[in-house]
Image: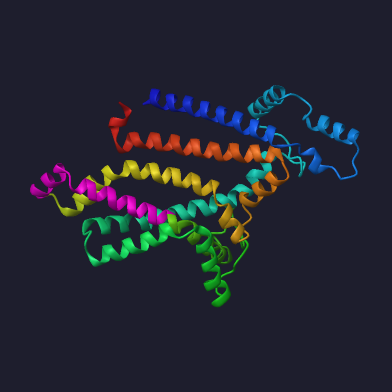
Amino acid sequence: MTKYILNRLFHSALVMLTISFIVFFIMFKAGDPVELMLPPDATQQDVVDMRAALGLDKSFIVQYQKFLLNVSKGNLGNSFIYGQPALDIVFERMPATMELAVIAMILSIIIGIPLGIISSIKPNSIMSRIIMFFSLTGISVPVFWTGMILVLIFSVILGVLPSSGRGEVYLFTSAFTWDGIKHLIMPVLTLSVFQLALILRLTRTGMMEVLMQDYIKLAAAKGVPRKVIVYYHALKNTLIPLITIIGIQFGQLVAFTIVTETIFAWPGTGKLIIDSIQNLDRPIVVAYLLVISFIFVAINFFVDVLYTFVDPRVRV
């Protein structure tokens, strides 16, 4: 088990190193941020001095070596626009984004898996058909359309929910205050609709496949209670592909909440990264992408380790 974990950690470190090189190279070739930072009447000498002050006059290899050295010290450089440590700026916005992603994923799991199980036990029942109809709708509707419809209904027509902002924050989250909860409802629903439908459909497909296996029929023939067969034998063997999808989708929720944050003016990392790309603020973009990449790598590592508990054969 220890060897397996160390092997996964080594591969994760290689992935992060590769990602850092690719991201830094792309931003190096993207353009010169100095031209956007200086006023139109700046002289050529001003441009040269600014490039030297920011370290942009060095070659790519020299800049990347300095970048890796700073990363080893926990420093990803200062923002060209804000003049503050890029990592601090990203971490300042990250709690708001993580809040949406975590709550949306939890809601999707606690609703999607039970509905998937119900629809798999009696796939031809009216209840199952209704569940699958709504799941197909949820997986087909674009996120931006869902968000705008929710705003139209609950903010414009009914006037019961706020259409923008994060609301009152307590202990780094809005979930502990009534004002914060009201601000959370629509963004969380917007993000969770697709995830819920996807988890529901995957659970249903996996359960239906497992319930047709011979060992399930043998357990039923031996008189094993139906609940034990469904929730212990069948569900456990459905979890491995489900865990994979949940891990990947959670990473995507964190990385791609830009549309939702834009619709609801949510103060997360979405607007920050858009503004930074437009301004060629390299330290912010690199810091954001590395943080997101680390989250993806950490999730995949956690999923791989979780496999070994769900199915011990993975260790071999």
Which residue is at 64% across, 38% downward?
287
Q: Quadrant of the C terminus?
A: top left
The colour scheme applied to this rendered structure is rainbow
Can residue 235 be spotted in the picture?
yes
Indicate the quadrant where residue 44 lies. Answer: top right
Q: Is residue 199 left or right of residue 143?
A: left
171 to 312, vertically: above or below:
below
Q: Which span is picked out in magenta?
A: 195-223
Q: Is residue 155 left or right of residue 298?
A: right
Is residue 128 magenta-colored?
no
Which residue is at 40% across, 56% downward?
196
**How far from the left and from the top, in percent, is residue 87?**
66, 39
Q: Is residue 154 left or right of residue 36?
A: left
Which residue is at 90% across, 41% downward?
42
Is residue 218 magenta-colored?
yes
Out of 260 and 164, give the one closest to the viewer: 260
**How far from the left and from the top, in percent, is residue 176?**
54, 60
Indicate the quadrant where residue 155 lies. Answer: bottom right
**How far from the left and from the top, in percent, is residue 170?**
60, 57
Which residue is at 50% across, 58% downward?
143
**How far from the left and from the top, in percent, is residue 260?**
56, 57
Q: Quadrant of the N terminus?
A: top left
Out of 260 and 118, give the one closest to the viewer: 260
211 to 128, vertically: above or below:
above
